[in-house]
Image (cartoon, rainbow, N blue to C red):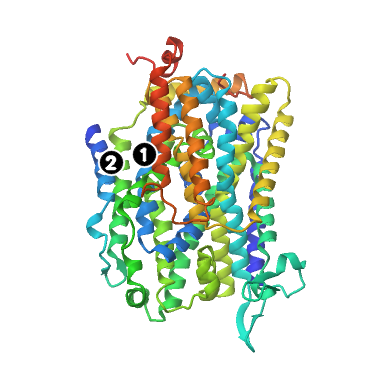
Amino acid sequence: MKYLVWGLVVLLIILHQDFWFWDDDRLVFGFLPITLLYHACISIGAGFTWYLATLFAWPLDEDEVARLARNAAAAKHANPLQGGGK
Amino acid sequence: MAQMIIIGGYLALLLILGVFASRMFRGTSQDYMLASHSIGPFLLLMSLFGTTMTAFALVGSTGESFEQGVGVYGMLASSSGIIHSLCFFVLGVPLWKLGCKYGYTTQIQFFRDRFDSDKLGLVLFPVLVGLVIPYLLIGVMASGGVVNGVTQGDIVMIDGVRTVVEPTFAEGTFPAFLELGVNEATGEASFAFGSKGGLPREIASFVICCVVLTYVFFGGMRGTAWANAFQTIVFMALGVVTFYVIANALGGQDSLLANMRVIGQGVAENHPEKLDREGMSQLVFLTYMFVPLSVGMFPHLFQHWLTARSANSFKLPVVAHPIFIMIVWLPCVLIGVWATSGLITIPAPIEANPNLVLPFMVRNLAGPILGGFLTAGVLAAIMSSLDSQFLAIGTMFTEDVVVHHGGKNRFSEKQIVLIARLFIIAIVALTYFFSLYEPRRVFVLGVWCFSGFSSLFPLVFAALYWKRMTKAGAYACVITAIASWIYLFSQSGFGMDAGYYFLGMMPVATMIACSTTALVVVSLLTKPPGEETLAKFFPVKH
């Protein structure tokens, strides 16, 4: 499923280059340029693809998230000035 | 005058919000800069989206679609829907995790740690601040232009002389250097070629800067996140209202659909080339896809990522961001194209300065009260970016220069916050100074600014995912990115040549190719990172 999600992201990037509508000035429903409608659909498709990504390809597991949250809270109380790094 | 009262009321409301947020301030620099990692999914979505949508998205997109047609949406809006969320996903979440684990507040702390280099921050700091300045400039410049545009009087020809009728501010209200412009035909100074009876853009920009500075200073990151959420709701709602009002006023029919059909027909008859991408290069369109990669290196977005309460807070922004972009950009692009329908006459000075297309449409097609609210909506979008940028540069200066090089115990909490504020004021003053010069097209300047940040994308991506990347590779990447940006930006006349391409492509493609090549070649030629660094950033999963 994870690979399918990343495949969809690549597909969106390819579909974004819509040379087939390049010189098409048709108005859909009499007011919406077809190229604009197509790219609005790309935006909706992106939202759906990223929804699938959060379900099936999320990079952190819940245990790790809980542990990090605890560490962050402990670090905050120990040193409010913080500023990590070197 | 009604517009002025509404705009003034809106600015006062923001100040109250900032003061209210300051009552929740916990008194630590950590709370001031990162809201103590307390921001949940909704506030994170609104603040990330409000921050990325600026004058570029409203004023710039309308102006550019007026110039180039509907192809502008594909160039930046639908591509950003894919790429921005990709960056939140592949960069934002891992960086949030590392930020929680090792206590980072800024990007530079992460890079210093990852490459085990104290001096890398000194190279990166001026580069990031230098690239933020044009971004700030877009907001400062556009806010002045929009307020001036909607408060201007009407221009009529009386006895062959351009005359201002019903000005908001009569001639002589402000000093002459703020009111008068040059009539290029005669070379004479004229009110009708200057502020045209509106609030002079220099004053409007100054007031906007002061308001944003005040609520950022009072409320810190918490105030900024709240103000961003509030302003994002305001500009999205008013954007939809603007679209509805302009469509009805322009079409003059009984229903919205009938109005849009009449306007669409007008564009098809007068400027059919605006309805497709005829004349637009496919290679340029393709290479525009690199521009949204800039979000991966925006210092203010890095800081917003770190405010998240948990990694799950990212899920809503990742999903909703493309849809929100569509809600904002689609009406703006259509309004820009509708300005060419022949149903409204666009005067030559507006045609020559596309930044003014949206304020012109609002002023002429909405009444003064609605016009005032719509202007507040545009200002909301501009200010919701300026605030985060102000806070980010202040945080970088205190954390990466003052505290890091001056010593952690040298300054008190209060002194650190004060130093951050003074540095922000200095940068805003410098930006304001630049805004007084001849204005560039918001869209063009925005693309150059984003291109600079995009050229640094390989740095953050490789730092997270390529073990073999070395300190020398990081230096090479940063130096090559900024050198190629300066060279190409200067070749375009510092944004004056709006149609500047390099090798038939967007200059950003060349910049990314150069910085990536430098990063890879130098990393492979130098000693790999130590075991300790690899264990810290690339732990083996059991």
Q: In this view, which residue lies farthest toward the bottom?
A: B159
The amino acid type found where label 2 is placed reads Val
Counting other residues with Cα less than 10 Å from the Cα at mark 1, is it few (<14), some (14-19), or many (20 or more)? many
Image: B276 above or below A80: below
Q: In this view, which residue lies farthest toward the top?
A: B531
Q: What residue sits 60% from the left and 46% below the top? A: B387
Figure quadrant of residue A9:
top left
Counting other residues with Cα less than 10 Å from the Cα at mark 2, is it few (<14), some (14-19), or many (20 or more)? many
Horizontally, residue B295 falls left or right of residue B385, namely left
**What residue did someone put label 2 on?**
A9
Could one spot residue B84 in this view of the protein?
A: no
Give yes or no for contact between labels 1 and 2 (Cβ–Cβ under 8 Å): yes
Image: B316 above or below B471: below
Figure quadrant of residue B372:
bottom right
Residue B21 horizontal/vertical position (percent): 64, 43
Q: What residue sits 60% from the left and 18% below the top? A: A78
Horizontally, residue A3 falls left or right of residue B247, namely left
How much space separates mark 1 and mark 2, taking CA atoms? 9 Å
Residue B48 horizontal/vertical position (percent): 48, 43
Q: What residue sits 69% from the left and 51% below the top? A: B210
Q: Quadrant of the C terminus of chain B?
A: top left
The amino acid type found where label 1 is placed reads Leu
Compare residues B521 and A85 and report the one nearer the observer.
Answer: B521
Image: B404 above or below B216: above
Residue B487 horizontal/vertical position (percent): 50, 42
Residue B23 horizontal/vertical position (percent): 67, 41
**What residue did someone put label 1 on?**
B86
Could one spot residue B69 in this view of the protein?
A: yes
Figure quadrant of residue B84:
top left
Q: In terms of secondary structure, where does tag 1 sit?
A: helix
Q: Quadrant of the N terminus of chain B?
A: bottom right
